[in-house]
Image (spheres, helix red, strand yellow):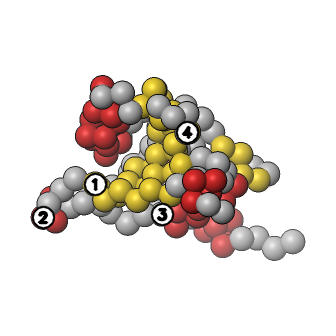
Amino acid sequence: MGLSRNDLKIAAMHASGATRAALEAIAGEGKGSGNPVYQHKRGEMTSTERRYEDQFLKPLLQVGMLKSYSYEGERIHLAARSFYTPDFVSIDRDGVKTYHECKGSGPVREASAVRFKWAVTLNPDCRFVWARERRAKDGGGFKVETIEPRTRRGE
């Protein structure tokens, strides 16, 4: 069994007397988010998620179109060691469960989109909403795509 590229980098840095922070930065390279500065903490809303809640979910709850909603209220098991946590889970007045996923105007990680599509496939009786924030120069707000339950589409 050979050493990985990261293992070789770490060994070389260690031999040169590199600091622990430098070694950890290399060890974390290629894992998780491509952005080493921002790490989403479970249970804390991002500014994009807060805007989506204020613009869409709260008004729908006030007019009675939603019974309830929760932030990161459910975790969907996709496969062994693979999960998808939607940003919001809501229950409509007609009892249909809806999973909401909010994304900012920057690039979307491929893993996030794949997990979303995978969850849609595994849960045909639920509604899914993919909300993408528009840039301010494009008018702001959200572009919202809804995937209806298959039972409602006649499949």
Find disc 2 in the rendering and name its residue: 137
Find disc 1 in the rendering and name its residue: 142
* Outermost residue, front side: 154
Residue 111, quarter of the rendered image: bottom right
- Seen in the image, is 77 located left or right of residue 127? right
Residue depicted at 66% across the width and 73% down the height: 5
Residue 109 is marked as: 3
Position of residue 9 measured from the top left corner of the image (x, y, whole percent): 61, 68
Q: Earlier in the sequence, mark 1 or mark 4?
A: 4
Residue depicted at 54% across the width and 49% down the height: 127
Q: CA distance from mark 2 to mark 3?
A: 23 Å
Position of residue 75 measured from the top left corner of the image (x, y, whole percent): 63, 39
Find disc 4 in the rendering and name its residue: 96
Can you tell which of label 2 and label 3 is closer to the viewer?
Answer: 2
Viewer-proximal residue among 15 and 49:
49
Q: Can see residue 39?
A: yes
Q: CA distance from mark 1 to mark 4?
A: 22 Å
* Outermost residue, right side: 1
Q: Mark 4: few, some, or many residues within 10 Å (few <14, many ≥20)?
A: some
Q: CA distance from mark 2 to mark 1?
A: 13 Å
Position of residue 61 measured from the top left corner of the image (x, y, whole percent): 35, 28
Query: In the image, what residue type sits under mark 4?
Result: Val
